[in-house]
Image (cartoon, helix red, strand yellow):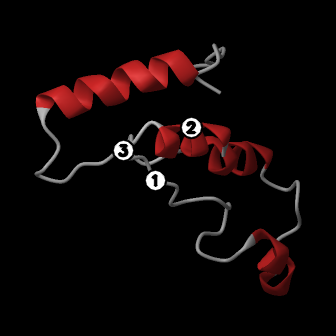
Amino acid sequence: RRALEAACRAQIELGSWFETPLHPIPLHAHARVGYRLGSCPVSEATAAQVINLPLHERVTSDDAERIVRFLLSHSAPTSVRVGG
């Protein structure tokens, strides 16, 4: 969420589409469909961190480079596990 707020202040177009594991159902309503919080921790963590990049035809090469620079300057290093 902080990255999206910073992007807005910097006039960088980013979005947040999938904020919960059962999008578009809000997290507080997941129990209504039988989902128990914590049953899919990877999905829950991913949903909380995913952002959407603009892909429309008005994005120029300069825009794309500016977005990448912004993301690199606002991202935290993470470890990546391959192969589960």
**Residue, disc 1:** 15
Residue marked by disc 2: 6
Query: On the rendered image, what quadrant is the C terminus found in?
Result: top right
**Looking at the image, which residue is at 67% across and 77% down?**
25
* Label 2 element class: helix
Residue 28, above or below 3: below
Name the amino acid type tagged 3.
Leu
- At x 64% / y 51%, what residue is drawn? 47
Question: Is the Cβ of the residue at disc 1 closer than 8 Å to that at disc 3?
Answer: yes
Looking at the rendering, which quadrant does residue 83 occupy?
top right
Give the labeled residue for mark 3: 53
Total marks drawn? 3
Density class for disc 3 (Cα within 10 Å; few <14, some 14-19, many ≥20) is: some
Residue 6 placement: quadrant: top right
Disc with the residue nearer the chain's start (2 vs 3): 2
Instruction: Give the percent coordinates (x, y) of residue 8.
Output: 49, 46
Question: Nearest the camera: 82 or 6?
Answer: 6
**Residue appearing at x 58%, y 22% in the figure:** 75
Q: Residue 69 at what x, y percent from top left?
A: 38, 19
Dot 3: element: loop
Place of residue 80 in the rendered image (x, y in percent of width and height, measured from the top left) = 61, 18
Q: Residue at x 30, y 48 (%)?
A: 54
Q: How far apart in space, not on screen, are marks 2 and 1 (Cα)?
A: 12 Å
Disc 1 marks which amino acid? Gly
Q: CA distance from mark 1 to mark 3?
A: 6 Å
As displayed, is residue 45 above or below residue 24? Answer: above
Q: Position of residue 40 (x, y in %)?
A: 78, 52
